[in-house]
């Protein structure tokens, strides 16, 4: 069955889901997006994703061309039309068609696209063995330049760091900010554990306020684990007991080596495993 894509108010066939070369999303990366999971036919953490989408749009003065209720209905319709039970939704709002100049206000109508498809996760065994990563030399965008809260369609900073990772035959890289503190990974948030306490960089360090990050913090606190948001150095990553990343696509994945330093005993640690299990339970709760 050909994929049906939501494009500006209606479902169209994959082959007809095309945007103009004058869309400022293409010309300038001018737009915002969300990546959302579907577990057991339910759209996961939808409220939180929509809140981030509307807030990101507000910061860049982009109008989401429909209200929240209408958008929720459009998302559900797209998921159902494609028979997605466990999958991934990519929701985009682009600035729309304009002129060749930067001026976003020349774009009369923003464009809303919803793609619901299956997702290529990391191979299952990587969750058992844990992942090796590197530190990127590419510095994270200054948080006062492009605010990290804005999930914009402009991912070049992360893509350059991702290329560094791939050049080193690993799937991910940690990005540091202009002060040398850990910001995040190219598509995931960073957590470490030391002496039983969980640490993650604050959003101000240049991290996207991940929906999975916030959920994992809540799940950890429910387990009476202490979670501290504080600036982390490269050295903190090298000497921690456990290390994991969180994100919509990756969920919770253990890191076992960074820059040639083995983390803990070289396997995903007990707190990482527990939080991964708790996450799985939460995501699949109520599944028929
Ligand atoms: N940081 C970046 C740069 C991301 O793109 C993402 C999402 N892929 C995350 C962190 C994780 O955020 P979330 O848990 O909301 O997917």
Image (cartoon, rainbow, N blue to C red):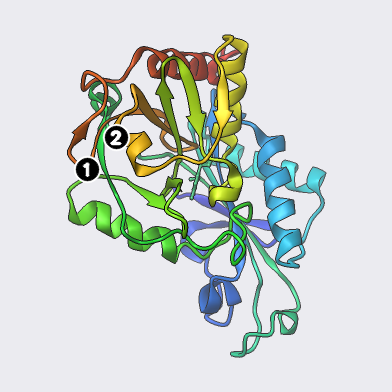
> Foreground mark, 2 or 1?
2
Q: Are marks 2 and 1 in contact (CB under 8 Å)?
A: yes
Q: Is residue 92 visible?
A: no
Q: Is residue 222 left or right of residue 124?
A: right
Q: Is residue 89 above or below residue 97?
A: above
Residue under circle 1? 259
What residue is at 40 percent from the left and 21 percent from the top? 194
Residue 188 placement (x, y as % from top left): 45, 42
Which quadrant holds the C terminus? top right
Q: Residues within 10 Å of mark 1 (few under 14, many from 20)?
A: some
In the depicted view, which residue is nearer to us: 17 or 28?
28
Q: Is residue 157 left or right of residue 62?
A: left
Q: Is mark 2 within 8 Å of ligand 1?
A: no
Q: Place residue 56 in its image quadrant.
A: bottom right
In the depicted view, which residue is nearer to us: 126 or 37?
126
Which quadrant holds the N terminus? top left
In the depicted view, which residue is nearer to us: 67 or 122?
122
What residue is at 67 percent from the left and 36 percent from the top? 46
Q: How many marks?
A: 2
What residue is at 76 percent from the left and 78 percent from the top? 108
What residue is at 35 percent from the left and 43 percent from the top? 234
Residue under circle 2? 238
Residue 246 placement (x, y as % from top left): 46, 33
């Amino acid at each position: 069955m050909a994929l049906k894509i939501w494009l500006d108010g209606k479902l169209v066939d994959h082959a007809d889901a095309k945007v103009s070369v004058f869309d400022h999303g293409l010309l300038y990366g001018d737009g915002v997006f969300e990546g959302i999971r579907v577990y057991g036919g339910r759209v996961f953490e939808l409220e939180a994703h929509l809140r981030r989408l509307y807030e990101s749009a507000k910061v860049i003065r982009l109008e989401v061309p429909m209200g929240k209720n209408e958008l929720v209905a459009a998302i559900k319709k797209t998921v159902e039309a494609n028979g997605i039970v466990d999958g991934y939704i990519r929701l985009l709002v682009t600035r729309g068609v304009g002129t060749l100049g930067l001026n976003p206000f020349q774009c009369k109508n923003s464009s809303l696209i919803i793609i619901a498809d299956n997702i290529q996760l990391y191979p299952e065994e990587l969750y058992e063995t844990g992942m090796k990563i590197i530190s990127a030399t590419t510095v994270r965008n200054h948080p006062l330049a492009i605010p990290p809260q804005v999930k914009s369609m402009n991912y070049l900073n992360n893509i350059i760091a991702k290329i560094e990772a791939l050049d080193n035959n690993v799937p991910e890289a940690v990005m540091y900010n202009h002060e040398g503190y850990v910001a995040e990974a190219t598509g995931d948030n960073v957590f470490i554990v030391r002496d039983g306490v969980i640490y993650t960089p604050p959003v101000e360090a240049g991290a996207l306020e991940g929906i999975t990050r916030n959920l994992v913090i809540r799940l950890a606190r429910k387990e009476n684990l202490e979670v501290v948001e504080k600036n982390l150095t490269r050295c903190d990553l090298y000497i921690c007991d456990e290390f994991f990343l969180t994100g919509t696509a990756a969920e919770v994945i253990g890191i076992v080596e960074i820059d040639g330093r083995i983390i803990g005993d070289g396997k995903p640690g007990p707190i990482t495993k527990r939080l991964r299990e708790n996450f799985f339970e939460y995501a699949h709760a109520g599944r028929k």
